[in-house]
Image (spheres, rainbow, N blue to C red):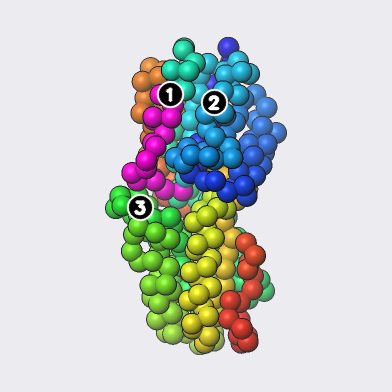
Amino acid sequence: MTTSPALLIAGHGTRDEGGADALRALVRLLAERHPEVPVAGGFFGVPDSPLPLSDAVDGLVGRGADRLAVIPLLTAPTGPVPEALPAVLARASERHPGLTHVCGAELGPHPKLLDVLERRLDQALGSGARKPADRARTTVLLVGHGTTDPYANAEVARAARLLWEGRGFAGVETAFVSQAAPDVPAGLDRCRALAATAGPGGPGRIVVLPYFLLPGGPVERLHMQAEGWAAAHPGTDVFGATVIGPEPEVADVIMERYRAAVAGEPPLGSAPCACRAAAEDARQAHGAAWQGASLTAGAGER
């Protein structure tokens, strides 16, 4: 029996080896920073994942864990999925009698994640993001996964608003890779219209910013859609940012969620998995291969 509940990081639905490697890196980072807490991670929601959540559960049980604090590795709720997290955990409890769990909230839009997103924007723009005037002519397209659940999609819009507040960008628009409008091309159309009204700092430009924690298939589709739109609009400078990735800030937010789940733990084994981030997070906020390169050939000065 472990002293503290083990930490189980539950990623959603990827068959991508890059995403699995990023989750492994995040698990290693958490294990190094918090050796007192057994930690493992895996994916639910799709078959044939290279890192199944069930294997992560089995590994923690093999290390002596009989209590799990489960943190969904999501920036926003998933909406309806073929195989929901509670069902996966229920089967794990059947395989391991006596195993109990409590679930915490997903991660976003936490102020620390917004800080990483801002860093990804600056990295994409390179030296063209150093002055307030540079930001004032930059429009951001924050792209989420997309779902049929309007409440889940609204979380992406909330993150966009919080990213825009106090950071000096011309605007932050939203788009979705699938299942929700606007899609990426429509979102870029909206950004182009806004960029055309940029102030005296020079012509506007657009940064496509994935609102994803890990790489994977949806991010690749996002890149392809953005590249196709940029090729059809050679007069608009479009830059691509990378995903959030296994950063220390992500580890910090996971541990915050872990501690909150453990501190508010109801009778073990009886709690449904949370699917909403704490609204208070946002109130604390202040106010890929094409990273840093223009997607338009022969683009002018950024």
Q: Which residue is mark 1?
A: 91
Asked which secondary structure carries label 2, the reply is helix
Query: In front here: 130 or 31?
Result: 31
Please tell me which of labels 3 and 1 falls first in the chain.
1
Q: Earlier in the sequence, mark 3 or mark 2?
A: 2
How many residues crowd mark 1 within 10 Å: few (<14), some (14–19), many (20+)? few
The residue pinned by badge 3 equals: 147
Residue 27, position as x, y percentages in the image: 63, 36
When the figure is inspected, residue 58 is found, relative to residue 21, above or below; the finding is above
Q: Amino acid at mark 1?
A: Arg
Seen as rendered, the residue at the extreme right is 32
Look at discs 3 and 1 and give the one toward the viewer.
1
- Real-space CA distance between mark 2 and mark 1, rounded to the nearest whole angstrom: 11 Å
- Mark 2 residue type: Val
Mark 3: which amino acid? Thr
Residue 112 lies in the magenta-colored region: no
Q: Residues within 10 Å of mark 2 (few under 14, many from 20)?
A: many
Q: Quadrant of residue 129?
A: bottom right
Residue 300 visible, this orientation: yes
